[in-house]
Image (tube, grey):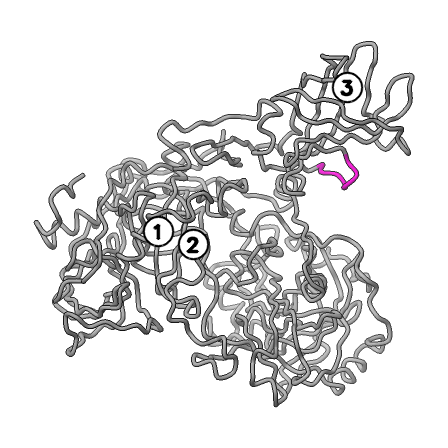
Amino acid sequence: MILTKSIKLTYFFGFGILAFLLVVNADAKQADADYFDADNNNLTVFSVNVFGQGYFDVNFELTGASSLRLTSAQPAAASIAAENTYDPQTGLLTLPSVNLKSNGAVVSNYYLELSLVDPEDLVFGLQEAVEAPLPVGVSRKQLCGDYGCFGLLTKLEGAVDGNIEKGLGSRPNQISWDPAELSSLVVQQKREFRSDIERAGHEAALSTVVVFGDWCMPDVNIFPDPVLLKTEAESGFFVSDSLILTTANALKNMEDLAGQYLSANVCEDYSEQTGTLAQSGYGPFVQLFDGRWARGEIVWSDKVSGLGAVRLVSETSDRKIPLQDWTPWRESLDGDQQWLNLKPTSVSEVKTTASVHSPDLARIEGGWFVSIKDASACLANAEGSTLYLDHFSDFGSYGGPIVDSSGAVISIIKNSRADQNGGLCAANKSSTIKNSLGPLSRYYADGSYVTEGIQITSELISKLKELDPSIGTISPAPITKDILRPGLAVETAQRFEIPILSPQFTESAYPVAELDAPAIEIAKQATVAFLRETGCATCDENRRISNFNIGCICTGFAITQTLIVTNDHCVTDLSVGAKTTFLTFYGQEVEAELVGKSSLDGVAELTDAYKEIYGMDGSTGFHRGDVALLRTVQPMLDVQPLEFADSSKLEAWQPLITVGHPAAMTRTGPWVTGVGSFVGGNYFDRTDQAYNLPAAQGASGSPVVNLSGELVGQIAYGGTASGYEKTAILPDKYGLFALELEIDTVGITPAPYSEREDIPISAQTSSGAPSNYIKEMVEKWAPGELPEGELF
């Protein structure tokens, strides 16, 4: 496991472990800055002022844990870094700012002092290494275990707890991660593009925006966030220096939401109910790729085409300041951010494209995803005026540009459309292969929907020229700078403890060395798919099917040849004795009868610790741990049931595995494997514990196993990491009981570069019942049916 019983918490001590610490500094410099390359153990220093000799560029190689040998020196072209000095009298080499590089990225910055210890072989010993200071209030530790080390950032050391009035509630203190603060801690990502279309897509992302039609805004002097309610965000893009093309739907104001939230005067009614003074009608609001915000006015909206246009009037880098303090829009884009050209193209002529969009389902990860697809793969594009593309999108994507390899917009994302049988795009047909993607840290959209695009026409371009005559008259200048993306996903910043993981771990802190662990196969073969809430009258003991193209209500797992565990919320409408149908990994359909569910007789109250601390009773909720047990009519053939492990022995960051049936991954096939790690047990609720594991609709009821393939828990819900940490890590590790993490739910940043082009659809964290509680419920509902030796 990553962290064994002897958890080691160490700080950086020497040069020998530089490669393992992946935390960066605010002062990370340009490519020509001095740097130590952790991949080849070389130190490159530009322009050392050798007293009395002149300036030299020098190179060293690491020859021991803390010694370096001079390998080359040549006169420097210029004194780029005059602060680098070498005193021949003392033999002391001083390097005030050396970047640490790993995998081509700058990951930290150090002040170094080297001393000449062997003049004959030109070997220097490391005398001092001081890392650049962290922001005030931030602490960092290094966690090491069997599979390597990674850093952990937090503001919890010395944090002030809120006030608890027993029996009356609490007034929590709040802490937050500032975006600028995080950008100083974790380096932005650079990417080498593998094709013209990939580069075109990511360059187009710089010109793509997120559009909110309206906000319900309270007094910013009273509320920390000036957005009480908001319209649904969609996408758009620049077509000139100040004109945004988007969807007509994105331009709806708060009053257009009447009936969805409250009555005709949505913002005013909400203000009255909450006792706030708030107003709406100041939109649309636009978020740019670089993090700035702009406000605009609607200059065109067309129901027939479904498109609209916004002219920007003001901007700010801090959306929380009063609107009157926003500065006028400068009528020109900064740096390499450019407008996009529009190019009329026949749908039948479209080949490979790149779509830039910010799907709502993936806002937990960030925005500005780039989906690259070949339009010719969808046979429906041979004729007609609607472009079909084989990638996921939802309403957050609508209005996003679809570009060709030249970077010109040839279509606009209109909506998504169901295509279960692959009639529009053949590759969209659901898979019958069990888990074709391998172990995943996140679930990805891989379902039965295709994207529809609105064709760019000459008529559309003419209409836009009426609004801005500059459109189409000048080509945007080529982008010359690197396209950088944040090093952390949005959701990662929604944690009290932020892991900065080395390449030895997945983003869920699962060791890469264990991606083929035998425990994965153990978990898969014991997992079942919950097919129907009604029994199958024709099922027989030997029935098998080979078509795993299934619609799955939930997931379950076998603990004996005849007992299946799933979630209580999967059987909410079923009474004890009701019949259901499951499908095993080996293709056997089995009829099962509901034996018990925790909502009827599970643990209803939180632990005594909750009452002692808060002075009141607390409830575990309607589902009371969310466990249900069913007994099959016939034995499950070939299945090896899961054995129980003691969940009380789980440790933070211990590797864990889950297998489930997420509904949005029908093309992936069922039995999708998720890998991650343990967060912690709920301090107040012994029916609940949390994991760094994916969760999505259809995967409810999934088993969670350790690297021995033993059951340690189950998944019921996905959620925000800070919510789970607040009830697990904060009270147990830091003794904090009234502390909240303030999270920006409106502002998003571009998603980090990923090896996958798929859209992530699952939260990073999830929760469910511990194995100890599951066993307790099973013993109540089916006493004596677990094998001997299953009592730990």
Q: Picture quarter containing residue 462?
A: bottom right
Q: Which residues are magenta?
A: 27-33
* Cα gap from disc 2 to disc 1, whole angstroms: 8 Å
- In 3D space, how far apart are the residues under numbered discs 3 and 2 (Cα atoms)? 48 Å
Asked if labels 1 and 2 touch by Cβ distance under 8 angstroms, the answer is: yes
Q: Please, what is the three-letter code of the amino acid marked with disc 1?
A: Ile
State which quadrant residue 708 falls in. top left
Residue at the far top in the pictured view: 89
Q: Is residue 29 magenta?
A: yes
For the C terminus, give its image quadrant: top left
Give the number of the disc on residue 520.
1
Which residue is at the front of the view, 67 or 341? 67
Q: Is residue 737 visible?
A: no
Between disc 1 and disc 3, the foreground one is 1
Closer to us: 563 or 293: 563
N-terminal label among 1 and 3: 3
Q: The disc labelled 3 sits on which kind of residue?
A: Leu
Of the pair 301 and 48, the residue shown nearer to us = 48
Residue to which mark 2 is pinned: 439
Q: Nearer the viewer, residue 186 or 113?
A: 113
Q: Residue at x 40, y 49 (%)?
A: 516
- Give the Cα distance between marks 1 and 3: 52 Å
| Residue type at the position of mark 2 | Pro
Mark 2 neighbour class, 10 Å CA radius: few under 14, some 14 to 19, many 20 or more: some
Lower sequence index among marks 3 and 2:
3
- Give percent across and percent down for residue 583: 25, 67
* Magenta stretch: dominant secondary structure: loop
> Is the residue 123 above or below the residue 312 in the image?
above
Secondary structure of the residue carrying numbered label 2? loop
Residue 99 highlighted magenta (yes or no): no
**Does dot 3 land on a helix, a strand or a loop?**
strand
Horizontal side of 744 relative to 599 (left or right) equals right
